[in-house]
Image (cartoon, grey):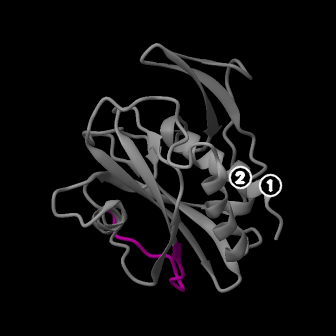
Amino acid sequence: MARSSEASGFQKAWTPPQEAPAIPWARIERSLALPQSWPDPHKISARFPESPRRAAVAVVLWGDATGAKKILLVQRGFTAPQHPGEIAFPGGMAEVDDRDLRWTARRELREELGVVDQLWEIGCFPDGVAKAHTRFTPVFFRWEAPEPIWEKGSEIFDALLLPLAPLLEAPWTTEILDRQGLALEVPRLELPQAPLWGATAFVLKTWLDVLKEISD
């Protein structure tokens, strides 16, 4: 069960602007390097995963030489076996043939959205723990396709490109989620399609808070 710790009642959906200034890639890269100085640079969740399996998600930042302009998210199909209808990063469980978790993120991105070209890995963020009790690694990619085009897989209902800079000042709220008897304060953002919440919102907002501290 979840209860809001900042607001109650209906929250109006936030409609992001279509365009926003780019965030320089050097600033993005510094935000991924900063957690290396944290007491635990390998995870950001206080939860312990119940499953020994690992997973990875692709945090795809679309832009050009000037910097990152938008972030790519998916809305999973309403009959998908995991997280139906929810907004998330492309990603999934590691398979035995995957070289590493970075490869898992690339494979899942290809399978879910068909994105393979003009894609560069720029780093990883500390791991989160999903609702399915699995530890997952966020792998960040720089995507410089002139036009962001994708092909949705069978488990994907829609793909969303949200302008990155406005997310830093978006009307995030928080809610308390009870996970394994542990009360976790988790960010939440109401979008027109569905709420952005849970482990995806936790990882994204944590990274945005780091990014916000870093000047261009």
The relative height of residue 151 versus residue 202 in the rendered view (above or below) is below
Tell me the residue at 52%/35% (across/down): 45
Residue type at mark 1 is: Glu
Q: Main secondary structure of the magenta part?
A: loop
Q: Position of residue 87 (x, y in %)?
A: 47, 45
Report which residue position mark 2 lands on: 210
The relative height of residue 100 versus residue 16 in the rendered view (above or below) is below
- Relative placement, left or right, of 172 versus 193 is right
Q: Residue furthest left?
A: 96
Residue 172 appears in the rendering: yes
For the C terminus, the image quarter is bottom right
- Relative placement, left or right, of 70 versus 138 is right
| SS for callout 1 | helix
Badges 2 and 1: C-beta atoms under 8 Å apart? yes
Q: Give yes or no for residue 148 being in the magenta stretch.
A: yes
Q: Residue furthest right?
A: 215
Q: Rate crowding at label 2 as few (under 14), some (14 to 19) or many (20 or more) other CA atoms within 10 Å.
A: some
Q: In which quarter of the view is residue 186 placed?
A: top right
Q: Position of residue 159 (x, y in %)?
A: 45, 59
Q: Give yes or no for residue 19 being in the magenta stretch.
A: no
The image shows a total of numbered marks equal to: 2
Residue 167 appears in the rendering: no
Check residue 213 in the rendering and tell me which mark sits there, or answer none: 1
Highlighted magenta segment, given as a residue range: 142-152
Q: Rate crowding at label 1 as few (under 14), some (14 to 19) or many (20 or more) other CA atoms within 10 Å.
A: few
